[in-house]
Image (cartoon, helix red, strand yellow):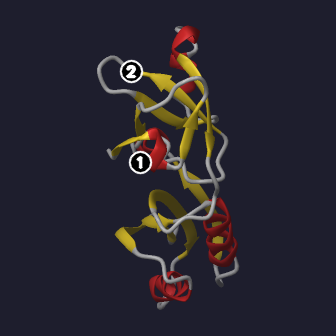
Amino acid sequence: MCIRDSSSSGIRIAGVDDVLVRLSKCCSPVPGDPIMGYVTIGRGVSVHRADCPNVAYMSATPERILEATWVGTKTENTHAVDIEIEALDRPGLLQDIMAVCAEFKTNASSVTARVKRDKLALICLTLAITNLEHLHNMLRKFSGIRDVRNVYRVTKREARVSTS
């Protein structure tokens, strides 16, 4: 969890200056995502994607929800984003996926792959993404790989549910 003040994080919190800002790991927002801020107790403002599953819990205390916006979506900073790829298992599948990472000059800090009984491979990657356009371009390219059936961005919460 990165803790930064709002002026250096690239995020503007409505009505608040010089506040600690933390990008939530549950939904991993990247520049370009619709976002919202949530005032935490003792840890500044936690920034979530507007479609984060945890937003439902935050709605119980609407006075702690703040409007948040990105200050520009082009950045050299990267953000960890989890994606999953479902594909028919075959020799060279993982190599083709990693070739897309190389083509986009994108670091994968974590890669796990497993094959289910029905020969369906599930490949989970944590990628260093700069912005929403970068992410969408990669997802589109992964979708074009032979035998890939589904590619999607996940949150930590969704990942736990799908692997149990």
In the picture of the structure, the residue carrying the numbered disc 2 is 40
Residue 57's place in the image compared with 120, above or below, is above
Three-letter residue code for mark 2? Thr
Tell which tag, 2 or 1, sits nearer the viewer.
2
- Dot 1: within a 10 Å radius of its alpha carbon, few (fewer than 14), some, or many (20 or more) residues? few
Residue 34's place in the image compared with 13, above or below, is below
Which quadrant of the rendered structure holds the N terminus?
top left
Q: Secondary structure at mark 1?
A: helix
Nearer to me, 12 or 120: 12
Three-letter residue code for mark 1? Thr
The x and y percentages for residue 13 are: 56, 32
Residue at the location (62% across, 75% down)?
Answer: 142
The x and y percentages for residue 159 are: 45, 47
As drawn, the label of residue 148 is: none
Nearer to me, 142 or 78: 78
In the picture of the structure, the residue carrying the numbered disc 1 is 163
Residue at the location (57% across, 38% down)?
Answer: 12
Residue at the location (53% across, 49% down)?
Answer: 10
Q: Secondary structure at mark 2?
A: loop
Nearer to me, 161 or 75: 75
Which quadrant of the rendered structure holds the C terminus?
top left
Please tell me in which quadrant of the rendered image residue 11 appears. top right
Disc on the earlier residue, 2 or 1: 2
The x and y percentages for residue 132 are: 64, 59
Please tell me in which quadrant of the rendered image residue 69 appears. top right
Q: Is residue 155 visible?
A: yes
